[in-house]
Image (cartoon, rainbow, N blue to C red):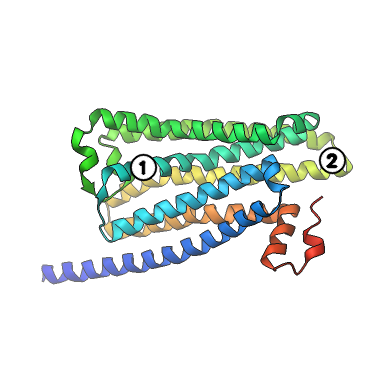
Amino acid sequence: MADNNSVVGGKSLMGIIDHQVILVQVLVAVFLCINFMLITTFFMKDFFYKTMRYMLFAVTLLSDCLILILSNILLICAYFQVTIQMWLCVVVYILSSLYTFVTPVTLTAMSLERYVAICMPLRHGELCTTRNTMHCILIIHCISSLPCVVLLSIFYASASITFHTQYRVCSVEMFMLYRWQSHMYSAINQFYFLIMCILIIFSYIEIIKVAKTASGENKKSTWKGLRTVILHGFQLLLCLIRMWCPVIETALLRIDIILYINVRYSNYIIFYLGPKCLSPLIYGLRDRKFFLALKYYVLCGLYKNKALDLS
């Protein structure tokens, strides 16, 4: 009787996982289509890839697309129990770890760009050139790579020499051999997000000061910039919540496997997939110039005169 219950429970569990994996594939496909549409719009106009805030926006789009693709590949490999050589898993881990940090760090840089544009308008053209933006993107990637470098350095100090020749189902957890490694990685995450929160709050306060003294068109532009910083802060909050999800999921795993699967699935949809599409889409629609260009290309030039007015 117990065996029959186990079989029924196992089939029920597999049924839940089957439906969840299928729904994730649909959502990932939809989100990638939306993000690729935004990326295509960016590359269609010279104005966009010569302006700092649009260049940084494109970095977040490309970063989110790469993370969506990599996380979906790992999900499918885990579902079908596909094993790969560990050197390839290391490459996947490096890319996923790097671009997990690239998005929030870039959001912080975008908030600072709004701070410079509103609080230091006379120096904005000098500081936010295309050349400086490329340097900024390089710095963003260097800063984002530090947690991955630290964790891999500790891992290789403990891993066996034959590690690269082994075949396993790839997952991020396998690079944390000891519990203290997980705690250290969590501490690094918290430090990063603390610094980013401080910078965004600083930008918010400084822009508020300017908004109180501005008038006319300047006041309208300042409040628009303030709303943009608030949006970046909200995006960063979602990233911060996602960081705590593994802690909650690990605790639930000890209580009930079905509850663990459902909560992990919900966290993945709400705090992982959702922000990587909805936030960039909202940002793109809020910007008049980007929205007009997006409208023009989506509607195949139906509103040509209005959409091309990007001055």
**Could you tell whether 280 is left or right of 124 in the image?**
left
On screen, 21 above or below 220?
A: below
Q: Give the alpha-carbon distance from disc 1 to disc 2, as whole Å.
A: 47 Å
Q: Provide residue 276's location: percent of width, then percent of height.
A: 53, 52
**Number of numbered discs overlaid on the protein picture:** 2
Circle 1: element type = helix
Please tell me which residue is depicted at 60% across the width and 60% down the height of the picture.
Answer: 37
Residue 6 visible (yes or no): yes
Q: Which residue is mark 1?
A: 91
Q: Provide residue 194's location: percent of width, then percent of height.
A: 52, 32
On screen, 150 above or below 301?
A: above
Please tell me which residue is depicted at 32% across the width and 51% down the height of the picture.
Answer: 252
Q: Provide residue 122's location: percent of width, then percent of height.
A: 81, 30
Circle 2: element type = helix
Q: Which residue is mark 2?
A: 218
Identity of the amino acid at label 1?
Val
Q: Quadrant of the N terminus?
A: bottom left
Foreground residue among 204 and 117: 117
Q: Which mark is residue 44?
A: none
Residue 209 visible (yes or no): no
Query: Badge 2: few (under 14), some or many (20 or more) residues near its Cα, within 10 Å?
Result: some
The nearer-to-camera label among 1 and 2 is 1
Query: Badge 1: few (under 14), some or many (20 or more) residues near its Cα, within 10 Å?
Result: few
Q: Provide residue 30's location: percent of width, then percent of height.
A: 52, 64
Foreground residue among 50 and 10: 50
Disc 1 + disc 2, Cβ < 8 Å: no
N-terminal of the pair, mark 1 or mark 2, is 1
Q: Quadrant of residue 202?
A: top right
Foreground residue among 248 and 288: 288
Identity of the amino acid at label 2?
Asn
